[in-house]
Image: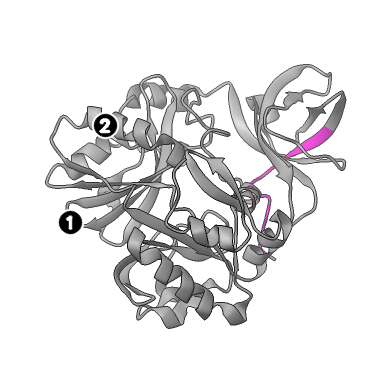
Amino acid sequence: MKNTALTAIHKSLGAKMVPFAGFYMPVQYEGVTIEHHTVRNDVGVFDVSHMGEFLISGPNALELIQKVSSNDAAVLFPGRAQYAYLPNDSDGIVDDMLVYQIKDEQYLLVVNASNIDKDWSHIEKANTMGADMRNLSDDYSLLAIQGPKAVEAMQSLTSVDLASIKYYHFKVADFAGIDNVIISATGYTGSGGFEIYCKNDEVEQIWNKVFEAGASFNIKPIGLAARDTLRLEMGFNLYGNDIDETTNPIEAGLGWVTKFNKDFINKESIEQSKLKGVPRKLVGFTMDEKAIPRGGYIINNEEGEEMGIVTSGTMSPSMTIGIGLGYVPVAAAVPGSKIHIQIRKKSVPATVVKLPFYKKS
């Protein structure tokens, strides 16, 4: 099990530590519900340093990224980021990722912790054009400072106007006394805020200054359990749950980050899926009765016949109802459709809804 540079601090704060994606990570501090509401209402800080970072550089960097990424990185410019996925050769997804253009001929790919080695091998195999690749995953830390008070709470720590950093944009600037920090707005919670990429030997200073600056804003450390409930309320995919090597990206609702105006791995087959349609789709649903859906539960139709599977589910702390994501036949994927979730021996009614579940009031 690997540790992040902040593991000792998490333990000192009383975090419940668990193995996650090969790392020893804080799953919660005070409790999932309290931490969830902190991010929805105030500001919370996640240590997500387990994520992987690959630096792709040189005159052939864009060519490599265009080959392995579903999205069109040609539209990026320094200070702009995009969401994308790495398609495999069999209509599945190697991983989903963020692509940042740091400067001309230099890009940062941010990948999921559990897939770092697999993703690196996949991209390296595709690198027939000789782009420069560096795996920075073990050298860098990542904090996600999330919530509606994040900008106000953190503004004193940087010379950059944080409010001016638009969604999916970033700045390389000073933060908490450290130069050349990436400050980005690509949040996974739906409550605003930003992410801080820095070197491992810088993150403890940044963590301490963040909590000093946020003291009057009810700032709290937040664990991975609340990160999951927050992302699920937004209907965001989680690799390993909602998408994986066997998931067709079109059925997963990722057509919006699949750009067919350029060549990429398995383009033709994915394009056929888009043109011809897919047999099932990933949908969001809410429980009609008090019940909690969980990943792996069976989805039935109204006649009791099995027709799909739940991929993510929880009790929504914001709305206090059971919510979930799952795959169902296209005919049942229309908002308002009635489905049933098999919870032990009971078939509990649910309704397909338009995402996100959580909408800011």
Label 1 SS? loop
Q: Position of residue 160 (x, y in %)?
A: 36, 77
Amino acid at dot 1: Asp
Residue shown at 33% from the left, 37% from the top: 69
- Percent across and percent down for residue 45 are 54, 64
Observer-side mark, 2 or 1, equals 1
The residue under label 2 is: 263
**Depth check: 229 or 92 in front?**
229
Nearer to the camera, 124 or 97: 124
Q: Which residues make up the magenta segment?
A: 349-360
Residue 134 lies in quadrant: top left
Q: Is residue 179 above or below residue 335?
A: below
- Where in the figure is residue 268, as x and y percent of width and height? 34, 23
Label 2: element kind: loop
Q: Can residue 183 be seen in this view?
A: no
Q: Do callouts 2 and 1 mark residues in contact (Cβ within 8 Å)?
A: no
Residue at 75 percent of width and 36 percent of height: 293
- When asked about the image quadrant of residue 290, the answer is top right
Residue at 34% in and 24% down:
266
Q: Residue 104 carries which label?
A: 1
- Mark 2 vs mark 1, CA separation in Å: 21 Å
Residue 334, given in percent of the width and then of the height, sits at 68, 35
Q: Residues within 10 Å of mark 1 (few under 14, many from 20)?
A: some
Quarter the C terminus occupies: bottom right
Residue drawn at (35%, 66%), measured in percent from left and top? 202
31 magenta-colored = no
- Amino acid type of disc 2? Asp
